[in-house]
Amino acid sequence: MLASNCIRTLGWIACFLFVPPNCYSQYPLRQELTQAGIPLTSFSKAELDEIVDGAGANKDQYVYFAYLRTKGEMLTGKPQVLRYDQKTGAILRSEVQLKEKVISLGSPDDVEFVDDYVLLSFHYNPSASSVVVLDQQLKIVELLYGFEISRVARNQIVMVENMMHFAPVHPERLEFVDLHTGANTELYPPKGDTLRERFALESEKHMPSVEVCKQLENDLCDPKLYDEDVSFLGSDGNGRFALVAARDASHATKKDEVPVTVASESALYIYQQGKSGWLYCEMQVSEDEAKALIGQDKNGYDSVKARCIPNLPVVADMTTAGFNPFPHPQRRAK
């Protein structure tokens, strides 16, 4: 997982490096460019005085910066992207032209790099983000809807799909995307998952009565629908990775009562990309072990890679697909 190395201090952004690996803020463009170490000579005074909301990152000899102009408290215009070559001094500027209708494109949140591609993340709400995928020349090649981008192989990622923010439950789903071809498939949850089916049976034991369910607004009264959090542990970089899924089922016992947790568990999954599709294996782990695995500073995959051997074919379980109203990537011709 590619995380930010910036912290907010009294409303200002404090970064650990002169050129921040990842940083976001809302200041005059002049201040943003100066902080990133990008020369101002290619910009007009009017541009430099504009208040912008931006995110920046550096890779090798290049500094990348993406921003949206602001008008009052509103974002306006198309995303602007810069690439500054620290060796030659050349600045490449591009305006992101989205050909399709965008469901959500909020504040610039992050700039990440996956091999041949630059990924710009835009924060919409705590349950949804847009990711604009650019090539090295800053030309758009894809628009993704998801967050927590994680590399699993060259030019290949997995991401947590967007969800409806105001919903009774938030079952996270994991999607695989090949940035080069546009091929994609949903990996989690897999259909026929023994642990999830067993968990649904446990949730069903604590279901409210039919009469109470008719009165409830924030309880779907479906034992197969519950909160799930997917945490990526790491990858071998060649199409094999591990994750931890945490499940919580909550139910109310009467109208206007806040649902309480009636069942919870954590499970470890290991996925392997094969010639004929994806395979997975699973095993239940304690909540303490799950927290320890998620909290590791280094690649958590190394500590779990031998726990089970992926041998079950992945077929997407679409039971919770309706909680993601956002489109999936469209496969592109090579």
Image (cartoon, helix red, strand yellow):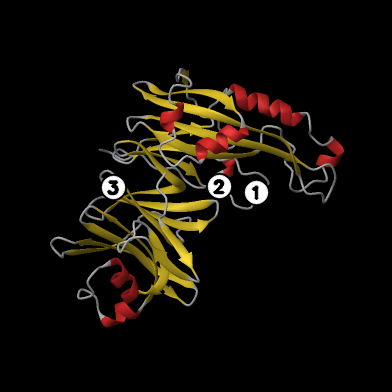
Distance between the alpha carbons at the discs numbered 3 and 1? 33 Å
Q: How crowded is the residue under tag 1: few (<14 C-alpha within 10 Å), some, or many (20+)?
A: few
Left/right placement of residue 51 relative to residue 269 reads left
Mark 3 vs mark 1: give the one in front: 3
Of residue 209 and residue 236, the one placed in the foreground of this image is 236
Left/right placement of residue 88 relative to residue 80 reads left
Distance between the alpha carbons at the discs numbered 2 and 1? 9 Å
Check whether the beta carbons of the residues at disc 2 and disc 1 lie within 8 A of each other: yes
Q: How crowded is the residue under tag 2: few (<14 C-alpha within 10 Å), some, or many (20+)?
A: many
Mark 2 vs mark 3: give the one in front: 3
The three-letter code of the residue at mark 2 reads Met
Q: According to the image, label 2 marks what residue?
A: 163
Task: Report if residue 173 is visible in the image.
Answer: no
Q: According to the image, label 3 marks what residue?
A: 117
Q: According to the image, label 1 marks what residue?
A: 167
The three-letter code of the residue at mark 3 reads Tyr
